[in-house]
Amino acid sequence: MSGHTPNNWMQLTKRDAMSTADLQLRDETELERIEHWRAGELERAGYDPSSAACLAAVHDVDLHRAIEMIESGCPPELALRILL
């Protein structure tokens, strides 16, 4: 064990667990930032805030396609039904 006592291993494990929890929190925060950005882009294109948030949370919805649909005259309600 090259100088590591059980206490050292326990401390290392606790430190690693905190790092993992921090990383998960950081990932969730990054995901939330992306979804907020996507929702903002969709709102600017013409979706209402609720529809924009719904679309933004579905990651397999192509943001550019959702915006192009509105720009080419598709009503937001119809675009939402098509995309979801």
Image (cartoon, rainbow, N blue to C red):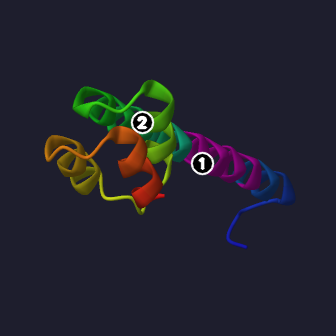
Look at the image and give the residue range highlighted in magenta. 13-25
Q: Where residue 58 sits: x, y (%)?
A: 48, 54
Judge whether residue 59 can be spotted in this image. Answer: no
Residue 75 on the magenta span:
no
Instruction: Give the side of residue 24 with respect to residue 14, left or right.
Output: left
10 Å crowding of disc 2: few (<14), some (14-19), many (20+): many
Mark seen at residue 52: 2
Q: In this view, does 17 lie above or below 37?
A: below
Tag 1: residue type? Answer: Gln
Please state which of the two labelled residues, at mark 1 or mark 2, is closer to the viewer.
Answer: 2
Camera-side residue of 79 and 43 = 79
10 Å crowding of disc 1: few (<14), some (14-19), many (20+): few
Q: Is disc 1 placed on a helix, strand or loop?
A: helix
Instruction: Give the side of residue 76 with respect to residue 53, left or right.
Output: left
Question: What residue is rendered at 41% in x and 59% in y?
Answer: 82
Mark seen at residue 24: 1
Q: Where residue 62 sits: x, y (%)?
A: 31, 58
Camera-side residue of 34 and 52 = 52
Q: Do the residues labelled 1 and 2 touch (CB within 8 Å)?
A: no
Question: What residue is rendered at 31% in x and 36% in y?
Answer: 42
Check the picture and name the quadrant holding the N terminus: bottom right
Magenta segment, prevailing SS (helix, strand or loop): helix
Q: Is disc 2 placed on a helix, strand or loop?
A: helix
